[in-house]
Image (spheres, rainbow, N blue to C red):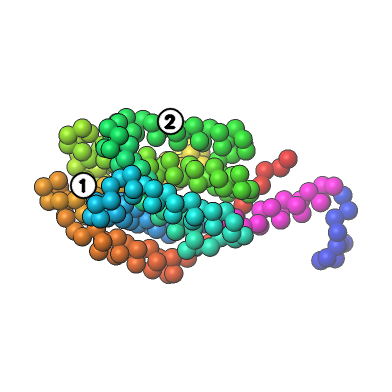
Amino acid sequence: MKGRGAQPHTPREAKQQMNVTAEEKLGKVPEVTLSFWIIKVAATTLGETGGDAVTMSMNLGYFVGTAIFAVLFVVAVGAQIRASRYQPFLFWAVIVATTTAGTTLADLLDRSLGIGYLGGTSILVAALLGTLYLWHRSLGSVDVSAISSRKAEAFYWATIMFSQTLGTALGDWVADDKTGLGLGYQGGAIVFGIGLAIIAAAYFWTRISHVFLFWAAFIMTRPLGATVGDFLDKPHADGGLELSRYWASMVLAIFIIGCILLLPQRAERMRVADR
């Protein structure tokens, strides 16, 4: 019998101990639970109202707004990558930065550059799929539980940025009654809510890859947040409630902070593939 502190005597035992250590190592992103999705939807909604507050209410325009939020994103994601462990407030600050930057960038592509909702959506779908392809080709997995290097983190945040921007363009395309599908903000929210419910059902009752379903849900929550955010702050004539973008953003920010403080969150346990 080996004592509690005994060393492994065979290569197989050594490998088993290494596997246990790898399984118990914690990552720098949160475990994907109900709390994660609640905060994620709130953050995407804040991204819409916050982005609109800067570009529309402050009249800074989409180009200046995109530049501001791009700088905030770079600073936040740099701090996140340098961090040695999962820090909830830092992680969600980066998520909010991607949602606000994604909002203004999508609006810049769709409106200021005249590409249109469908054109912007198509470009962003290609960018997102290309990033996921390069990530998988380079590291062999796009699973969030396998993010064990700065390179993987860089791919993770690039994927999130493209997914957030895509979600804004997709939400606007579905809701807009002039150049889109014309479902309105409430109709769009219902469509994307149903989409999320279908993904959740597939997660529990099918054998579809959970990694694929995670990214599908992550992308789907963005247009849901975009349409809810637009419903809150757009004029009555456009089908919105015409609430103050500043107040809506502040309430959402307080809600997110409260969720981070009160809802249980754990760091994702990393699974490092055998070499």
- Residue drawn 66% across and 57% down? 24
| Label 2: which secondary element | helix
- Residue drawn 75% across and 52% down? 18
Against 28, residue 64 (above or below) is: above
Is 173 magenta? The answer is: no
Query: If you read the primary sequence from the N terminus, does the residue marked by circle 1 or circle 2 appear first?
Result: 2
| Label 1: which secondary element | helix
Tell me the kind of residue under disc 2.
Answer: Ala
The rendered magenta stretch, by its main secondary structure, is classed as helix
In this rendering, position of residue 233 left or right of residue 192: left
Residue 197 shows in this picture: no
Q: Which residues are magenta?
A: 11-28
Residue that badge 2 annotates: 126
Residue 251, quarter of the rendered image:
bottom left
Against 165, residue 263 (above or below) is: below
Residue 203 percent coordinates (x, y): 45, 44
Q: Residues within 10 Å of mark 2 (few under 14, many from 20)?
A: few
Q: Nearer the viewer, mark 1 or mark 2?
A: 2
- Residue drawn 49% across and 55% down? 75
Tell me the kind of residue under disc 1.
Answer: Gln
Q: Residues within 10 Å of mark 1 (few under 14, many from 20)?
A: some
Is 12 magenta? The answer is: yes
- Residue drawn 24% across and 58% down? 245
Residue 210 percent coordinates (x, y): 50, 42
Quarter occupied by the N terminus? bottom right
Residue 164 percent coordinates (x, y): 39, 45
Residue 47 percent coordinates (x, y): 34, 53
- Mark drawn on residue 186: 1
